[in-house]
Amino acid sequence: MNYREEIIKLKKEKNALILAHYYQVDEIQDIADYVGDSLGLSQKAAEADVNIIVFAGVHFMAETAKILNPKTKVLLPDLQAGCSLADSCPYDDFRAFKAKYPEHIVVSYINTSAAIKTVSDVICTSGNAVEIVNSFPKDQKIIFAPDRNLGGYVNRVTGRNMVLWEGACEVHDILTTEAIFKLKDEHPKAKIIAHPECQAQILEAADYVGSTTGLLNYTKNDDAREYIVATESGILHQMYLDSPDKKFYVVPSDDTCSCNDCPYMKLNTMEKLYLALKNEKPSVSLEPETIELARKPIERMLEISKKLKLI
Ligand code: 13P
Ligand code: SF4
């Protein structure tokens, strides 16, 4: 079967929109109506005026789309596409943790379950975390969850002392400076760029730190010719499309390959996308109270981001 043709046909027939994250396989990125980072994808989901959104990403992203656009059917091609970072912050444990800091507000990274969002004051993404935190007075006490690496990075950039939940992403937390410096020895002119979910020593060694969209824009506008990329392999597809004459080396997660794939993102395939559109399932569903409570901190993030012209 030619999945590409069938998906295009069904998309038209059913008035559907395909949103894809940069970590999806190349063919899914190529067929999507929009490819972006978590911030751009949430904005697109909020604005979508369609019958169906097919979210080629992971569960928390599809959930966020449902929260922002509850009347629209939101499909996730594989419901098992979770996120180790979101899973590192279980609701009951987080409630107990939060109770220890009654004067603190909660800034949560978008990589969390809808349940965690219901007990958060504002959401942030890697594309706006510094600005969201800086939108609060310097003396505001803050809990940042769930990524200790992103939280630590924001603490260093903003000079804050936020209390950090000890979560991490298994795809970024595993990367080492040894692997980066090995690539740097092989490609001495290459610049190092990193996603803020990487550990502090990597972020300190990087020439640029940013969200997936930030990394992509940096490579587009910068005049270096080669980049060592500390994030998931999928981003290289758009980097090569935007800058075909440049070279990109992804930091490998181990010695067995020259890649670093998110096992959850890569669960989505063209076949599953086609079946999801055809059968209109699996879909994401949430209790109306959860949607109502989780929407407030996400909308607060979108409002701040619009005001600061980040979106
Ligand atoms: P971005 O919002 O930077 O695309 O990050 C999403 C993510 O899951 C990174 O691992
Ligand atoms: Fe989650 Fe990490 Fe995969 Fe991003 S790369 S979806 S944070 S497990």
Image (tube, grey):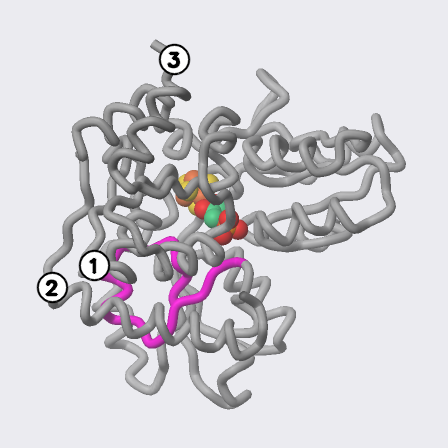
Q: Nearer the viewer, mark 1 or mark 3?
A: 3
Q: Amino acid at mark 1?
A: Pro
Q: In what quadrant of the picture does the N terminus appear? A: top left
- How packed mark 2 is, by other alpha carbons closer than 10 Å (few <14, some 14-19, many 20 or more), is few
Identify the residue under disc 1: 70
Q: Nearer the viewer, mark 3 or mark 2?
A: 3
Question: Residue at the location (87% across, 46% down)?
Answer: 223
**Does the image show residue 296?**
yes
Q: Is residue 216 left or right of residue 91?
A: right
Front position in the image: 172 or 281: 281
Structural distance between the alpha carbons of marks 1 and 3: 32 Å
Q: Is residue 296 left or right of residue 192?
A: left
Residue 174 drawn at (x, y percent)? 53, 37
Question: Residue at the location (49% across, 36% down)?
Answer: 23
Q: Is residue 117 a member of the stretch shown in magenta?
A: yes
Identify the residue under disc 2: 288
Residue range highlighted in magenta: 108-126
Identify the residue under disc 3: 2
Structural distance between the alpha carbons of marks 3 and 2: 38 Å
